[in-house]
Image: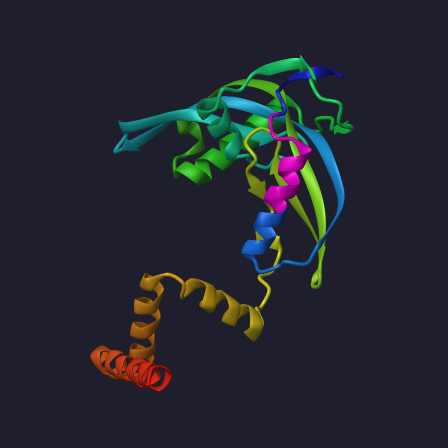
């Protein structure tokens, strides 16, 4: 599909999206969930280059520069986009190289509106007056984003996955599920397969009971000796 604006090559396929969403939910203890609608969206983003100057008593004492990405549909800052453009081998193309169905959003902000927003947001982010910020550029690129709606017991939530880097956004909207005793016990038993976990749990038990750690270890050793004596006559 031909594109009105350049876009990075989609490098995070649908199969990877499903896995990263599942892994994200598992970290919040959601093992049972339903992935509903999954949509590929190309979002227009303005890329500006900026220079900011720090002053003391009217004298410039420091300066910084970089890039800022402004979502052309809502004015939000995309902090990940400049990082990906600078740190990853991103290829910009005018025609997609995949066969996924996709929606291409149209910009609702003009370049000047986005530039003004970038100045305001940089002023707050960097802690410098607006007049000390110089912004140039303002080209639009279309950024691929997977939007996934997941159903868990507490409701339906949208999670976004960057189509270039695989970064996950919106996971903070999903609440952490409280684990049951069975899950906690299973996790503890799994961890106790490692000797280091025994040390950590025994020391934690001693600290919780407010007794010397050596006393707890002594009790455990005595119990082990009793079990061995009972098993081996």
At x 37%, y 82%, the residue is 231
At x 56%, y 26%, the residue is 115
The x, y position of residue 96, in whole percent, is: 70, 18
Residue 74 visible somewhere in the drawing: no
Question: In the rendered view, would you say 142 is above or below 155?
Answer: above
Question: In the rendered view, would you say 94 is above or below 184?
Answer: above
Q: How many marks?
A: 0
Magenta highlight on residue 129: no
The x, y position of residue 222, in whole percent, is: 27, 84
Magenta highlight on residue 18: yes
Q: Quadrant of residue 53?
A: top left
Question: In the rendered view, would you say 47 is above or below 222?
Answer: above
Magenta segment main secondary structure? helix
Q: Which residues are magenta?
A: 11-21
In the visual, does 89 lie left or right of 105? left
The x, y position of residue 163, in whole percent, is: 62, 31
Q: Where, quadrant-wise, is the N terminus in this rendering? A: top right
């Amino acid at each position: 599909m031909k594109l009105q604006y350049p876009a990075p090559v989609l490098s995070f396929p649908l199969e990877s999206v499903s896995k990263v969403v599942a892994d994200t939910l598992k970290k919040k203890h959601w093992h049972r969930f339903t992935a509903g609608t999954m949509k590929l969206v190309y979002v227009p983003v303005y890329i500006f280059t900026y220079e900011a100057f720090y002053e003391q008593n009217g004298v410039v004492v420091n300066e910084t520069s970089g890039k800022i990405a402004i979502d052309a549909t809502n004015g939000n800052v995309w902090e990940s986009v400049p990082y990906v453009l600078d740190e990853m081998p991103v290829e910009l193309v005018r025609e997609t190289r995949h066969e996924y169905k996709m929606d291409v959003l149209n910009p609702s902000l003009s370049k000047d509106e986005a530039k003004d927003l970038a100045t305001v947001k940089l002023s707050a982010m960097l802690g410098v007056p607006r007049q000390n910020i110089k912004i140039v550029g303002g080209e639009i690129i279309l950024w691929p984003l997977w939007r996934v709606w997941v159903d868990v017991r507490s409701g339906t939530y949208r999670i976004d996955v960057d189509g270039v880097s695989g970064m996950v956004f919106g996971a903070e909207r999903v609440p952490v599920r409280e684990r049951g005793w069975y899950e906690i016990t299973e996790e503890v038993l799994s961890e106790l397969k490692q000797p280091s976990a025994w040390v950590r749990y025994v020391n934690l038990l001693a600290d919780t009971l407010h007794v010397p750690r050596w006393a707890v270890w002594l009790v455990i050793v005595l119990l082990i000796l009793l079990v061995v004596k009972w098993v081996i006559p």
